[in-house]
Amino acid sequence: MTSPHETTEGFVNITGIPFEVDDGIAGRARIGLIVLASDHTVEHEFRQVVTMPGVALYEARIPNSPTITPDTLRAMAQHISERAALILPGVSLDVVAYACTSASIVLGEERVFELLRDGRPEALPTTPITAAFAAFRALGKNRIGVLTPYRDDINRMVRQYIVDHGFEVPVFGSFNEEDDNRAARISTDSIRSAVLDIGRHDDVDAVFLSCTSLRLAEIVDQVEQQLGKPVTSSNHALIWHTLRLAGVKDSLPGFGMLYQLPAGSG
């Protein structure tokens, strides 16, 4: 069947060309991600890991201060629902994640879930700390060494939150950098050294890097081989958890023990 067309001298305008539609780039899963305005790392690490066909990531940025304090973290609550609603309006998402570990702890996961559901009621919600807890359980690890870039008052809140959720934190380390723009530039060599220092303690079963600014994906395999224990981070766990929630349970070599777990884990 030919399409209607108009012809004038030197020009043909063809209209109403027939077409078919397929599942687009998200035939397996649509993942929505709310990213801090000051975040340099989380989208980069998602794209390092999520390369399988049919799984698509869609993001919205949320206003925040690059200076990370309890007050600046709480201030983001007013924007979470509206930013979730901005991601592909009118198109359903499988999962929506709020990518801030410390704010999810300060606000509480249930409050964040409530705000995410207000904006995207059809999507399964998660946060980096939710994902980390799921990862610890899937790995069968309870004694967690923690590394953060945060200042001391936030560090105390993070440690207590993890303990309150049934895990032990025998070793805790921090770079004590409250500027998110500088935290994102902490070198992978510095991160590797700190993880090995924390993880070498006998009473640590696994190491968790708390903060979506800290980079792990590109070094996690090497660090785990050196340490002999599982290592995960806010981004590393969040990527794994969003995939699992979306029903994508592919084994992904090169990204550490967590990504090698059987499909029924987590």
Image (cartoon, rainbow, N blue to C red):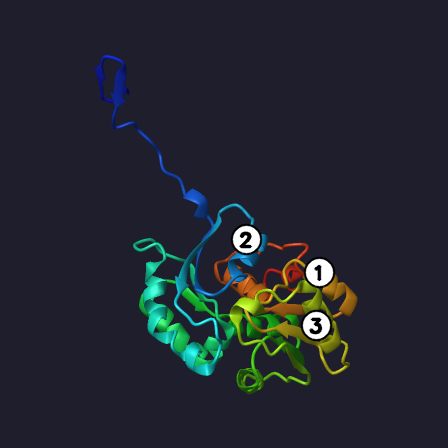
Quarter of image, res 166 = bottom right
Instruction: State the quadrant of the N terminus.
Output: top left
Q: Nearer the viewer, mark 3 or mark 1?
A: 3
Q: Nearer the viewer, residue 109 or 75?
A: 75
Q: CA distance from mark 3 to mark 2?
A: 23 Å
Rendered view: 153 above or below 12: below
Q: Position of residue 160 (x, y in %)?
A: 56, 87
Amino acid type at circle 1 is Asp
Q: Judging from the image, what secondary structure is the residue with disc 1 in?
A: helix
What kind of element bears circle 3? helix
- Along the polypeptide, which appears first: circle 3 or circle 2? 2
Q: Mark 2 — residue?
A: 47
Q: Which residue is mark 3?
A: 195
Residue occupying image coordinates x 35% and y 56%: 92
Residue 228 in the figure: left or right of residue 97: right
Disc number for residue 32? none
Q: CA distance from mark 1 to mark 2?
A: 17 Å
Location of the C terminus (image quadrant): bottom right
Q: Residue at x 74, y 83 (%)?
A: 203
* Residue behind mark 1: 221
Q: Earlier in the sequence, mark 1 or mark 2?
A: 2
Upstream in the sequence, badge 3 or badge 1? 3
Q: Residue 153 at what x, y percent from top left?
A: 53, 86
Compared to residue 169, the image places residue 248 above or below, namely above
Q: Is residue 46 left or right of residue 30?
A: right
Q: Quadrant of the rendered structure where residue 60 is?
A: bottom left
